[in-house]
Image (tube, helix red, strand yellow):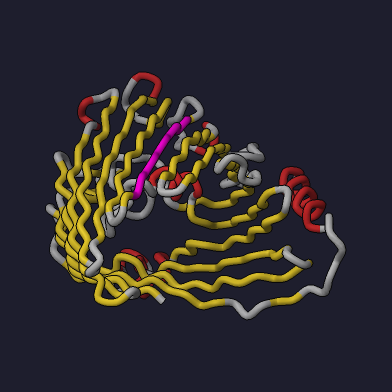
Amino acid sequence: MKLMKTFLAAAVSAAVATPALAVELDKPDFYGFLSAGALKVEGKDAEADAFEIELGLQGKVALEEKLNLNYAVEVDLAGAANSADDPSTGRDGEADIHVKEAKFWLPTRYGMFVVAPRGTSGQWRDIYGSINHYEYNESHADLNPDGIFAQPDRTSGTLAYHTPWFLNTKMVVAAITLNDSNKENVDGRSVRFVHKNGNLHAAIGTTLIMQNQLPGFATDDYLITAAGASYKLGGLTLGATWENNKDAPYPGVPGNKADYDSYGVSGYYLAENGFGVALGLKEKNHDYDAADNTVYTLKLEQRITPNVKVWAETGQYDEPVYVREALVTDTNYALGFNVTF
């Protein structure tokens, strides 16, 4: 609570640094992203699948001249759609409606303040976005984990501050408050530096997760350090990401923890006629060889209109990926379409 009060006080102080004007509430914009098709994962039956069904509202409140409080609320209904007829997931898939965005951000002359009870992870967007040219085989640890990288694509209970841009670079610091009953006001801390200069985009950052927020067998805090970069040359985009995991929870070994590195490279080419191709490689190098893995990814796409595309994709895994002894993913083949509005 003390942390929240301090953060809000700083945001309010920045907001009132100019003469006050009447508050104006703009009509929010409605937007969506729909992705569906057919999916076959080795070890599982082929099925029609909703990959993403995201619907959202985004708007702003004009507090003062050139000072706007922005907000976004977004839900992902894909889990509910896929499990609607599965009695193990709750009636009509109700347990699988995910709030993807519920956040506020206030840009000021002194930087930007963010309050996000739920939101897309900035670490994931800025660092791992360099290699995320895919539909089903994205690089993250949430919902459909790829088994290579540990960084989640979503986060909860986040308070963040972005410095003003200086020499094409900004710093972002964040406090993550996931649990209100574990005697830790802050369950995770992160910092990253983001650089944008023309066609070059680069970012490096760390996330520290407190032991009390980890599974009960964890014996230490967990540190994720990652860096990513991409460069665009005409229709070609090349990207690479590296992630180091120190003291990651790993049951059944001395100390119940282990270290590992993950790497990813990807190239994406989009022609003027709307045809695109992406080719990538991801690899995990773990302290324990049994947890090592490699996946090769390939995607072909054709944009029919600026808002509609069809695509085919495969991820070729050396080893299947299990979470709590359940098969999550393996070599896969997917065919689908995307619609944005």
Quarter of the image containing the C terminus? bottom left
User: At x 39% / y 40%, what residue is drawn?
Assistant: 229
- Residue 254 vertical placement versus 116 (above, below): above
Task: Say left or right for 145 vs 48.
Answer: right
Q: Residue at left 65%, top 46%?
A: 164
Q: Position of residue 177 (x, y in %)?
A: 60, 45
Q: Where is residue 165, by image quadrant?
A: top right
Residue 107 occupies which quadrant of the picture?
A: bottom right
Name the residue rendered at 43%, 45% in the picture.
Answer: 201
Where is residue 278? Give x, y as percent.
22, 53
Q: Name which residue lies at 34% across and 65% down.
A: 89
Q: Is residue 221 left or right of residue 340?
A: right
The residue nearer to you, when weighing 276 against 16, is: 276
Magenta-colored segment: predominant secondary structure: strand
Q: Is residue 265 at least partly visible in the picture? A: yes
Looking at the image, is 255 positioned above or below residue 98? above
Q: Is residue 309 left or right of residue 249?
A: left
Where is residue 59 shown, x and y percent of the image? 61, 72
Range drawn in magenta: 223-232
Q: Is residue 324 magenta?
A: no
Q: Residue furthest top?
A: 254
293 left or right of 222 in image = left
How many numbered marks does the figure carry? 0
Q: Is residue 71 above or below residue 167?
A: below
